[in-house]
Image (cartoon, grey):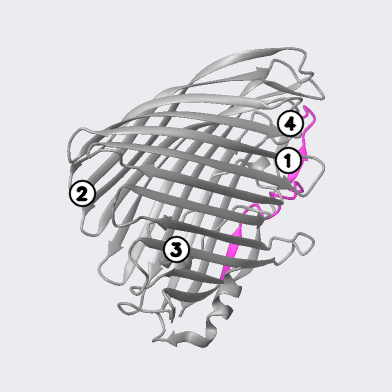
Amino acid sequence: MILMLALGFGAQAAISAPGSGIRIEGFKISPFVEASAGYDSQAWLGSGKNQEILPDGTFAQKDTDDVFAQFTVGLGIGPSTSLRPEWDVRLRGWYDHRVYNDLSEIDYDAFTAEGTVRYWPESDKYRLTVGGKFRSLQDYERVPSSAVQTMPAEMPLPYVEDRSDRLKRNNLTGFGDLQWTALSKTEFTLGGSVESTDYDGTNVYDNWNWTLRGDAGYRFSEKTSFFAQMNYRRLISDSFSKDVPVVSFRAGFRTRPLVKVDYKIGIGAKTYEYAVDSQASAYDRKWDWDVDGQLNWRARENLSIFGRAWTDVQPATTVREVTRRTYAGQAGFNYAFLRRLSGIGSVTYRYDDYDFPIEYPGQLRQEYAELLQFSGRLVLAPVVNTFWKLFVETTYERGDNDLDQYDQWVVLVGASLWY
């Protein structure tokens, strides 16, 4: 779709210097490409061939390190100055081709396309935002270094997914929000979203969910506002004998106590029904605490610190009738060294708590899954406002789920170029 938009307006394009994009009507088109080489300490992690079953029935990880080459080509579309200020349209997509030295039988190619459209009229009374994203991938998703120019507020770090989620799959998400400022100090938001995961295999279960939400806010001052929120979410999975409704209530506040600090904290509760065993012989109701917090702090002109904490409920992908509660948090920084070098890094922790232990042959039980991840990227721009950059990025991941522990380290070195 992105390529069709670019070709449809090609006759009216105004080509500018490299790095500043191609102007087409009210849009700026930015093709980009990346080439890189890397090392993966667990190259066969997604295939399962790196596991060795011990006499007690547990798993041990074999060393399956390998080197790989990766090539990325993509296109970003953002608004130019000629677009009316009440409209904001951003689209981008990219295709990754990854080739391992000793792993030719597994296809690690990936494709991602996403976009958002926002309408914010001059009356400033309401704002409409819609967006969506499609991902087709085998491993974790990587956001290219040169893709963030279209959506500059995004932190280009890997997604934090459990190993059982990182199988060959198609993900589709969509959302819509209508924000209405009724009075000078009140604001209401109605919205909804849908997510689906379709796995390419018979050993895991496809699932999807949809959510409706309402948000009411009151601005106490120029810097602080309070809000109350209610979410209704429905989990639907091939592994469930019936749908799982999840209802959550949350209240909190958003504030900007200083010019350089902005944070949001919401705390509440959620409730849902779950099967008490794998045969779904009975159901029970569970209450759980609910949190979603965000922090952005511009500590200095060249240093920004960010953080987030959240909870979630979702279906397990490899067993029947099991829902899992996820508790996760992330903290990181974005730092500019002089005017040529910039870096971003984060540490993320995720803990999955299953509603009942998962039973395996040999009297083995799995009660939790734990994930610790460190990620970083260093970008070198040879000159100011250049259209090409060099980068080094790395990810270290430690996973543990009672029966299976692994360490994975991936490092990537490459160059990005965009017009």
Q: Which residue is denoted by mark 2 in the rendering?
A: 260
- Marks 3 and 2 in Cβ contact (< 8 Å): no
- Mark 3: give few (<14), some (14-19) or many (20+) Cα within 10 Å: many
Q: Is residue 315 visible?
A: no
For the point 47% across and 75% down, the residue is 30
Q: Which mark is residue 58?
A: 4
Q: Based on the displayed image, in which of its 4 quarters is residue 104 positioned?
A: bottom right
Label 1 sits on a secondary structure element that is: loop
Principal secondary structure, stretch drawn in magenta: loop
Secondary structure state at the residue bearing disc 4: loop
- 405 or 31, which is in the foreground? 31
The 10 Å Cα crowd at callout 1, few under 14, some 14 to 19, many 20 or more, is: many
What residue did someone put label 3 on? 89
How far apart are labels 2 and 1 at the CA level?
Answer: 43 Å
Residue 2 visible within the image: yes
Does the CB distance between marks 4 and 1 fall below 8 Å?
no
Asked if the residue at tag 4 contacts the one at tag 2, i.e. Cβ–Cβ closer than 8 Å, the answer is no
Task: Give the class, few, some or many, for how many residues have Cα within 10 Å of label 4's Cα (few <14, many ≥20).
Answer: some
Q: Is 78 or 108 nearer to us in this picture?
A: 78
> Marks 4 and 3, how far apart in space?
50 Å
**Foreground pick, 107 / 59:** 107
Does the magenta segment cover residue 52? yes
Give the magenta part as a residue range.
Answer: 36-57
Q: Are marks 4 and 3 in contact (CB under 8 Å)?
A: no
